[in-house]
Image (cartoon, rainbow, N blue to C red):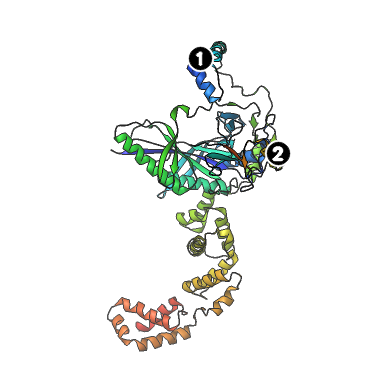
Amino acid sequence: MTINQKDIEKIAHLARINISEEESATLEVKLNSIISMIDKMQEVNTDNVEPMSHALEVTQPLREDKVTESDIRSDALKIAPEVVDSIFIVPQVIE
Amino acid sequence: MDWDIVIGIETHVQLRTNSKQFSGASTAYGSEPNSQACLVSLAYPGVLPVLNKEAVNCAIRFGLATDAEIASRSIFARKNYFYPDLPKGYQISQFELPIVNHGKLSISINGKEKEVRILRAHLEEDAGKSLHGIVQGKTGIDLNRAGTPLLEIVTEPDMSSADEAVTYAKKLHELVQWIGICDGNMQEGSFRCDVNVSVKKKGDTKLGTRREIKNLNSFRFIKQAIDYEVNWQIERLEDGEKIDQATILFNPETGETRAMRSKEEANDYRYFPDPDLLPLEVTANMIDKIKLSMPELPASVAERFEKNLGLSSYDASELTANREVTNYFNNVLQFECSPKITANWILGVIFSQLKEKDISISLCPISPAQLAKLIQRIEDQTISNNAAKKVFDALWQKPNTEIDLLIDELGLRQISDSGAIDQLVEEVINANINMVNEFKSGKEKAFNALVGQVMKASKGKANPTQVSEILKKKLTI
């Protein structure tokens, strides 16, 4: 598998980042070298290996279902560019 | 041409917890905007999610209730997309290894049982709410809901009509409330369905391309949306066009569906295991503990009602539609009332009153003990069934009145003194010789008319069975 300029454009859009043409060219080389390393790893037979999702052999601690957080609006809303009646106001999104 | 309809449903069930899925912020509905947006809900850098134990318990309860496999190890994953009501830029969900797999839920369609397979149910978090119209041309964001625990329940495409889909949704809605994992409040968004619809030529084995109708929060909308969508798809295919996979919205005002997201962007969520959360382990011990606290399931209660109490399957399933109704029914039965009469009263008179007043049975002003007393007075023939309805209406107005007092106050006590009835019958016979002759010449109808006359003479208080018996005896001498 190889990555082309179109893929980079798509990935950049999905991540909402702007990439210049020069950057994109460098990225293509870098990403393809990563992909080729992954291709190499793909050669290993993993049929009987359980996929690893975490490096540590520990499991998730659970939290008691208790309300421990208080209202921090006065601080949280302060840094927002626009607020009306404690509601964040953002550019319009329409589905 | 004939078409097969194929429907699968994904339901987002808000779990009934006090705090959020991954933080200790409150999940209460209707609070001041953003007052429950803690640092985790706001996606501040450096915060770590810590899983809510109760949400895990809820998922296990659901797994047990649907005879599913509960995974001893499940994994949380990031579902990446950008939307302002999701400040992290990803939703924490479960992807490859969900907590619940391969369950089933039985629904009854025209008296026939059908099994809907549940492919999986996974834990995830809700997004915040986008609000429109606060500032012209802008969107408002309230993050109180962000992080609320959800269980997403996904079926196989096992339903083949809008009615089946609605029946499944209702059944699931009853079940999640019954086992106490969801408050079921659809107006508040506690139970929302995404419905996948496709059609194929009758008998084809290959499924058609599906379109997913998002976020339906009423059973009526589910039905309307499916009906509209099925017609739309069939018309299109019959016109020789093809269906593109799409996410669509239902507009309740027009009853139409319309596409929401373009195809190329759909479903590019780039899931990967969330490094902030470790594998979730569910031990046999945890499951056993929860088993002990599980209520008997509605299907089993209904079966018991049919077998042991002789109720019809319809009555049994209506009486087990929610736990409050079942408890009410059981509480009346404790007073040794006839199950059949009790079922008729609850499903008839009480349900119609509750519906008219738009309240649930927990707010019924008439207690099970009072209903039991009323039924006993019918059974011991103190009052007729009709009189009992009058007593019931009066009782609804004055809930704490003693039933016997009320019967006397309304003058509804039935005359069962055969001497008194005998006399009334005698009078009516003498006053209606014509009718008596008609009866004797073979007109059966005249008999009922005579019974009616006696009832009228008694102001409705005579025991109708006794009246019939005495009248028959006198006329056939």
Front residue of this view, candidates B419 and B398: B398
Place residue B454 in its image quadrant: bottom left
Indicate the secondary structure of the residue bearing disc 2.
helix
**Left or right side of B93 for B459:** left
Q: Which residue is mark 1?
A: A3
Say which quadrant the N terminus of chain B sits in: top left
Depth check, mark 1 against mark 2: the one in front is 2
Q: Position of residue A69 (x, y in %)?
A: 71, 41
Q: Identify which amino acid the numbered label 2 is placed on.
A: Asp
* Depicted B255 relative to depicted B124: above or below: below
Q: Which residue is mark 2?
A: A75
Would residue B286 be seen by someone viewing this image from the given angle? yes
Q: Position of residue B106 (x, y in %)?
A: 48, 44
Say which quadrant the C terminus of chain B sits in: bottom left
Q: Identify which amino acid the numbered label 1 is placed on.
A: Ile
* Depicted B317 relative to depicted A75: above or below: below
Q: Check if mark 1's residue and mark 2's residue have beta carbons within 8 Å.
A: no
- C-alpha separation, residue under disc 1 versus residue under disc 2: 44 Å
**Left or right side of A78 for B67:** left
Q: Position of residue A81 (x, y in %)?
A: 63, 35
* Depicted A84 relative to depicted B333: above or below: above
Place residue B245 in its image quadrant: top left
**Left or right side of B475 for B267:** right
Please report whichever mark, 1 or 2, sits nearer to the chain's N-terminal start.
1
Front residue of this view, candidates B231 and A56: B231
Question: Residue at image x 43%, y 33%?
Answer: B246
Indicate the secondary structure of the residue bearing disc 1.
loop
Q: Chain of mark 1?
A: A
Q: Callout 2 environment at 10 Å: few (<14), some (14 to 19), or many (20+)? A: few
